[in-house]
Every structure is written in C-alpha cells, then in structure tokens.
Image (spheres, rainbow, N blue to C red):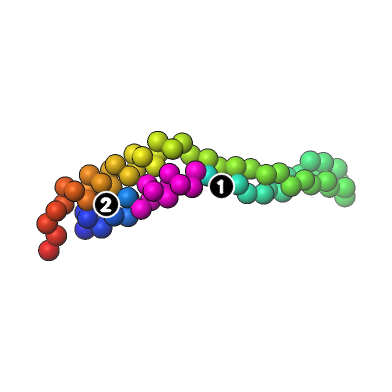
Amino acid sequence: MGRTIGIILIILGIVLLVWTGFTYTKKEKIIDAGPIQVTADREKSVNWPPYAGVIVLVVGAILFISNKKEI
C-alpha cells in the first residue's frame, strides 16, 4: 500500500510542478439597490508555489523507495 501511495504522490507532485495554478470567473454584485442590481464578472486565480510540488514529489519518492517489498 505504501508503494501505491508513493506512486500517487509522485504523479501528483509532477502535476503540481507542471500545472502551477488555475483561474476561474466569479459573478460579483457591485450595486444592489432594490430592484436594480449590477453584477460584474471577476476573474480570480488560485496559484500554489512550485516548492509544494517538489515536497509532494520527494515524499512520494521516499514512500516508494522505503516500501520495496510488497506482497
């Protein structure tokens, strides 16, 4: 089981290194005055630092290497 988790973490670490974030659009109310409402589409971004991918990758490699024997 440790090797499986290690492989998953290695793949996740590589994905985090390659894909460093994403953006999405959110509707926000700008004016809400009774029957009059004005909304705007705002673009938000979610980013994570590259060292997060390195940490996940290293932990996955350690798990994979430390569990050499799997029955």
Q: Which residues are magenta?
A: 11-20
Q: Secondary structure at mark 1?
A: strand
Q: Callout 1, which amino acid?
A: Phe
Residue 6 badge: 2
Which quarter of the image is occupied by the N terminus?
bottom left
> Is residue 42 left or right of 60 when viewed as pictured?
right
Q: Position of residue 68 (x, y in %)?
A: 14, 53
> Is residue 6 left or right of 35 when viewed as pictured?
left
Residue 22 badge: 1
For this rendering, which residue is in front, 70 or 54?
A: 54
Residue occupying image coordinates x 77% and y 45%: 40
Q: Position of residue 30 (x, y in %)?
A: 79, 41
Where 51 sits versus 35, above or below?
A: above
Q: Is 13 a magenta residue?
A: yes
Q: Is 42 a magenta residue?
A: no
Residue occupying image coordinates x 29% and y 42%: 58
For this rendering, which residue is in front, 2 or 65?
A: 65
For this rendering, which residue is in front, 45 or 18?
A: 18
* In the image, farthest residue toward the right: 35
Q: Position of residue 49 (x, y in %)?
A: 46, 36
Residue occupying image coordinates x 60% and y 47%: 23
* Classed neighbour count for the residue bearing mark 1: other residues with Cα under 10 Å, few (<14), some (14–19), many (≥20): few
